[in-house]
Image (spheres, grey):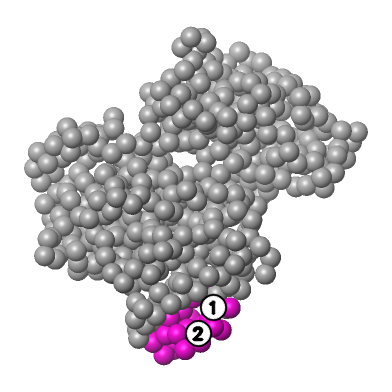
Amino acid sequence: MTQDRLARYHAKRDFGVTPEPAGSRADGGSGRFVVQRHRAGRPHYDLRLEVNGLLASWSVPKGPTLDPKSRQLAVHVEDHPIEYYDFEGVIPKGSYGGGDVIVWDWGTWEPAKTSDPAAAIKKGELHFDLHGEKLAGRFVLVRRGDDDQWLLIHKDDDHAERGWDPEDRPKSVKSGRTNDEVAAAPEVLWRSDLPAPEAAQPVEPWEAPTADELAALDDLGGSGTWELAGRRVKVTNLDKVLFPGERPVSKRDLIRYYAMIGPHLLPYLADRPINTHRFPNGVTEGGFWQKEVPDHAPDWLKQWHDAEADPDKTQCYAVLDSVPALVWMANYGAVELHPWTSALPDVHQPTWALIDIDPGTSSTFDDVLVLARLYRTALEHMKVEGMPKVTGQRGVQIWVPVRPGYTFDDTRAWVEKVSRAIGRTVPELVSWQWQKSRRGGKARLDYTQNAINKTLVAPFSTRPRPGAPVSVPITWDELDDPDLRPDGWTLWTVLDRLAERGDPLAPLIGKPQTLPKL
């Protein structure tokens, strides 16, 4: 029975890699609670209540609070094993939920207004009292509609405190460490489920294929099974040419590229639903957008079900969190990868504000560079950090990291205000018309991509053009390089670029940046 209740938990994790406990017992008890602060892409808090020997769990993006005026989103997730109660450490990158975890609060809890908390959870409303080191008093969890989104509310009782912010109390109640301190030694995992002498475990980061693994790919015929990072990935039609050009690119070449670029690309994809632009017959034959995960996807591929989707919309998205997942998607003909701007568990909160300089039919790349440099000046003036990338086609995009708490309305309005100011500076280069046919060949400064399920191409994704150009992050100074081209790097050359210059956008991933008011 315990294993049945933990089926969802087990399906998402590889216990040969993650230090999280697999769970081996359910003692029938109730009464303990834990809140873990978890930085997986962006910080959130996991509230867990012991119910019938397992931990009923909710992900709370902004964290629990004693403020009775707050209504905190809480996403109901899979039950966790009771051994998770004191888990603190680092889940490796590439694993589900990769990031650092601390035991932010713990203690005991009591149900209120019910003698059967499991039934109350099933019904969608649970009243309970917490007795923790930080949290105390009466709370309510109430489901919104029929999906996994709930609200977490603190009642206005003797323990209530207006303005109470969990971020003001960053230390673990177990070890006294902050998330930064837990993450400070990335070579070590702390396995709380092991005896102290065995608790330190080496981290397995995202790694490119070994020489032996690459040789095995080369040795496959037209189809076969590639063993990579502990996974068996079926690959097909390996010698089919997908990109024509002076140096044609086969499907085998595309698979090899996505495997090699994985350590650089995956930080932009992990924990995010993905939209793909597929060209199974090659980029000259026309492609199509695919979002829904097919039935034949391997069971180890991480998937996210969109509980808010209408019946005629995509229900289940892939979440690419490992090198084998990238290989599987490349074999599926996904030439372009477009991650959501928001991440799980709260897809309504963007992590990036996106600026898209979309050239018109008459725009030159010099025109695009004029606009990009104006954005550079504007962001410098506002002391806002962002970084440009060439699209691999004709344009430039600018990615600006934002702190948790913004809505898409917030980021869209902010980018629009900045863009309108840029447009007024060079009106001869910019049109605000939606339809390209009405723009008079001018560029559009597109702020509308700042919306849920609106995406831009991922850094290091290939683009569907002959020669396999790649979208590449660049520095602001490179906007002044006379040799810069928007499609200047290809699948064959971008790894050399990374070896020489690195990725200037990477340090901004997850940066909790506040956007100035305009």
Would you place residue 318 above or below residue 481 in this image? above
Q: Amino acid at mark 2?
A: Val
Would you place residue 196 above or below residue 209 in this image? above
Look at the image and give the residue range highlighted in magenta. 421-449
Q: What residue is drawn where x is 47% and y is 18%? A: 200
Front residue (pair 460, 12)? 460
Q: Is residue 149 left or right of residue 392?
A: right
Q: Is residue 183 left or right of residue 475?
A: right
Residue 219 visible? The answer is yes
Mark 2 to mark 1 CA distance (whole Å): 7 Å
Q: Quadrant of residue 367?
A: bottom left
Verify whether residue 338 appears in magenta: no
Q: Is residue 16 left or right of residue 407?
A: left
What's the mark number on residue 422?
1
Whole-percent x and y of residue 224? 15, 39
Front residue (pair 408, 1)? 408
Whole-percent x and y of residue 396? 40, 69
Q: The residue tagged with tag 1: helix, strand or loop?
A: helix
Residue identified by numbered label 2 = 426
Would you place residue 448 above or below residue 69 in this image? below
Q: What residue is drawn where x is 40% and y is 74%? A: 369
Quadrant containing the C terminus is bottom right
- Neighbours of disc 2 within 10 Å: few (<14), some (14-19), many (20+): few
Q: What residue is drawn where x is 28% and y is 39%? A: 208
Q: What residue is drawn where x is 26% and y is 65%? A: 488
Whole-percent x and y of residue 311? 50, 57
Whole-percent x and y of residue 68? 83, 43
Q: The residue tagged with tag 2: helix, strand or loop?
A: loop
- Neighbours of disc 1 within 10 Å: few (<14), some (14-19), many (20+): many
Q: Amino acid at mark 1?
A: Ile
